[in-house]
Amino acid sequence: MSVLFTPSVRYYFKELSVILYEEDYFGFFENALQYADKLFTEIENNLPNKHKKIAPKYFDRYGKENS
């Protein structure tokens, strides 16, 4: 399995760094940029390798259409 990103998702990650910097989550823009880049890389490289877990029965009612 691989993770594919649309151009809009790639743009979102670039915008994320700007938002994080402007909202003072990071004092330096470079740090915000590195954070967004690391997050992107983490998702791209590790998400396909995550183990699937079975959700509790409680969640069975979500995501199904009422017939």
Image (tube, rainbow, N blue to C red):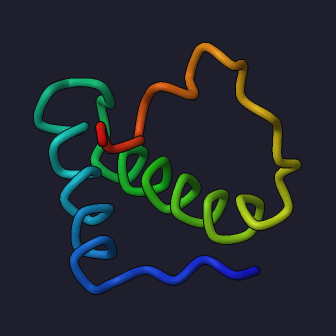
Q: Residue at x 60, y 77 (%)?
A: 3
Single out the residue that lies furthest toward the front: 67
Q: Residue at x 48, y 55 (%)?
A: 34
- Whole-percent x and y of residue 17? 28, 51
* Residue 35 as seen in the image, left or right of residue 48: left
Q: Quarter of the image holding residue 43?
A: bottom right
Residue at image position (72%, 19%) is 56
Q: Quadrant of residue 49?
A: bottom right
Height in image: 65 above or below 27?
below
- Answer with left or right where residue 1 lies relative to residue 37: right
Does residue 52 appear to the left or right of 5 in the view shown? right
Image height of 65 relative to 3, above or below: above
The quarter of the picture where the N terminus appears is bottom right
Residue 2, image x, y percentages: 69, 81
Q: How many numbered marks are there?
A: 0
> x, y (%) of residue 8?
21, 77
Q: Residue at x 28, y 48 (%)?
A: 29
Q: Nearer the viewer, residue 56 or 3?
A: 56
**Image coordinates for residue 53, horizontal then vertical, percent:** 82, 37
Q: Residue furthest left?
A: 22
Tell me the quadrant of the picture where the C terminus can be found: top left
